[in-house]
Amino acid sequence: MFGVVTNMLGAGHIKVRCEDGKERLARIPGKMRKRIWIREGDVVIIVPWQFQDERADVIWRYTNPQVEWLESRGYLKF
């Protein structure tokens, strides 16, 4: 699911506004935290937890050219 980072909370946690309209608390895995910088306004892919829908895991961050491509093709509906 696509989402936009709205707030950096620290300790590998972020607030994400998802494409379904919900605001979720997402966690950045340690492997990604060491290699990729995530900032407010970035478009990310998240996977909501099955047992707690208000939480999620970040699995990918898109770069600016990738976001422009997604917008031009109509994939992002924010």
Image (tube, rainbow, N blue to C red):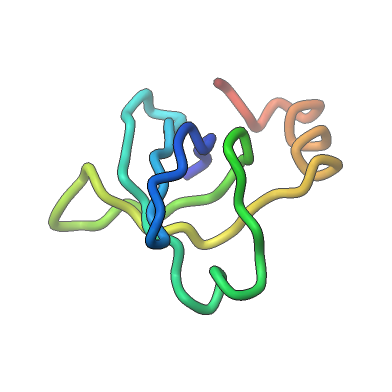
Q: Position of residue 69 (x, y in %)?
A: 82, 36
Residue 59 position (above or below residue 8): below
Find the residue positioned furthest to the front. 10
- Looking at this view, name the residue that lies furthest to the bottom: 31
**Where is 1 relative to 30, above or below?**
above
Front-lying residue, 30 or 19: 30
Residue 46 locus on image (x, y percent) = 45, 51
Q: Is residue 52 left or right of residue 28?
A: left
Asked whether 41 or 44 is in front, the reply is: 41
Residue situated furthest left in the rendering: 51
The foreground one among 50 and 44 is: 44
Query: In the picture, residue 65 is in which quadrant?
Result: top right
Residue placed most toward the observer, 46 or 27: 27
Q: Which percent across, then down, holds residue 16?
A: 42, 38
Which residue does the image show at 53% across and 50% down from the upper left?
45
Question: In the figure, is residue 23 to the left or right of 58?
Answer: left
Quadrant including the C terminus: top right
Q: Is residue 21 left or right of residue 55?
A: right
Q: Residue 53: where, in percent of width, then height?
A: 21, 45
Hey, which residue is sitting farthest right in the picture?
65
Q: Residue at x 61, y 33 (%)?
A: 41
Q: Is residue 19 left or right of residue 66?
A: left
11 lies above or below 42:
below
